[in-house]
Image (spheres, rainbow, N blue to C red):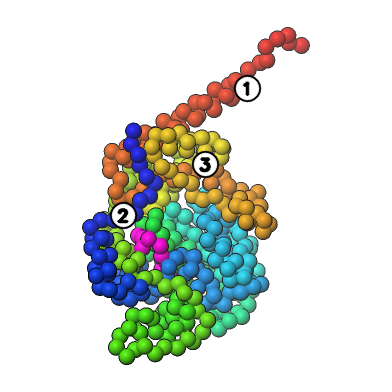
Amino acid sequence: MMNIPFSPPFIDEDVIDEVLHTLRSNWITTGPKVVALEQQIVKLTASDAAICVNSWTSGAILMLKWFGVKAGDEVIVPAYTYAATALSVLHCGATPVMVDVNADYSISANEVRKAITPKTKAIIAVDIAGWPCDYDALNAIINESEITGLFVAESFKQSLLNRILLISDAAHSIGAKFGAGAAAKKSDITIFSFHAVKNITTAEGGCICLNLPQQFDTAAEYKYLKMYTLNGQTKDAFSKSQGGGWKYDILFQGLKINMPDICAAIGLAQIKKYESQLLPSRKQIALKYCDGFKAMDWFIAPPLTDEQRESSYHLFPLRIKNITETQRDQIIELITAKGVAVNVHFIPMPMLTYFKNLGYHIVDYPMAYQQYACEISLPIYPQLTDEEVAYIIEAVISAVEKQRAENTEIAAYHKQEPAGISF
């Protein structure tokens, strides 16, 4: 029996060498490695600027605060996402307005339109599994005269934009494509996660990409946001350490959410081979899964490409037709018994205790529940061998077929006529 982990980080000799270089430089907090990683992210995404932070969540809180989101405001989010999407809104004192998703997991543009009110300040669209949302539809909505007429600007940044801010929760989707370019270019703000399980990792970390309209001074916003990540301080530690550069000032109440060089070094080594090696490996595995399951009548293929979009292949979200949540859980037990670690993405937020206590109800989000109840995330990462992928496919098919056979037997038993005298 094989033992296959779900999502180990990609650590090769280049990563180790980059980290050792940082250690030997005697500079491990925010410095040249972070700047180099930001430059590589700009190159990868063609974004106007990139600001590295210590997590996706920190980046989202920062950008909502930057825009002036506060108590009494509303931010539209999908019900089907990880909790951090809504928690970032709550940390700013605002209200997450949850809406349902489409069959491809992405936020429903129709539901977004219905949820917009004069209190709406932002929309956070989530690229589940690396599949980009329909950003053309979302951009069309927020630029409609009827919708812009509802917008109430209450901060300088809001007055400058003069419409709802579109944020992409791209925690899963670095490298995803939309049209001829990066999906990251389709939102005002795109935020990546570099958590340990992500396509590119810095152990913990994230990055904010700016693609704001031309009325914004991107260079000035980059400088301001870099200060914001360091308590509103005019100089980072690296600059202060250079000669007589010890003097600094605090200009505003910032946050302490900067990324250190020791973390950036991991991502820097990975991103240099992302498009040439790491991303193609993920795509190849996803296609092998599709080929391995295509003959199964219960297989629902995940969205990977269409005429506009291509996934980053962060997850392989297998969905199985006509099963219940309980049956899905039974299948997972059978798969893991064969040594294959799998996962589920995600438990919809209205099913979690904290959000239930806030008054959210999963019955209001039927598509989110439907997608969750039949989903199993399979291992997908560059280190997987052909033999391991074949083993995973076999383990999944065996588990699903066994559960379906048992379910058929139970159904047949319950249909039998009761023994004894008939009346």
Which label's residue is closer to the chain start, 2 or 1?
2
Q: Amino acid at mark 2?
A: Phe
Q: Quadrant of the C terminus?
A: top right
* Secondary structure category for the residue under label 1: helix
Badge 3 is on which residue?
374
* Percent of width and height locating residue 191: 44, 66
Provide the residue span drawn in magenta: 200-209
* Residue under the point 37% across and 80% down: 237
- Dot 2 alpha-carbon crowd within 10 angstroms: few under 14, some 14 to 19, many 20 or more: some
Q: Which numbered tag is attached to residue 94?
A: none
Of all residues shown, which one is farthest toward the top?
421
Front position among marks 2 and 1: 2
Badge 1 is on which residue?
414
Badge 2 is on which residue?
10
* Residue under the point 53% across and 64% down: 124
Q: Is residue 152 above or below residue 311?
A: below
Q: Is residue 66 above or below residue 103?
A: below
Left or right: 174 as drawn, with respect to 78: left
Q: Quadrant of the N terminus?
A: top left
Left or right: 150 as drawn, with respect to 397: right
* Percent of width and height locating residue 206: 41, 66
- Dot 1 alpha-carbon crowd within 10 angstroms: few under 14, some 14 to 19, many 20 or more: few
- Dot 3 alpha-carbon crowd within 10 angstroms: few under 14, some 14 to 19, many 20 or more: many
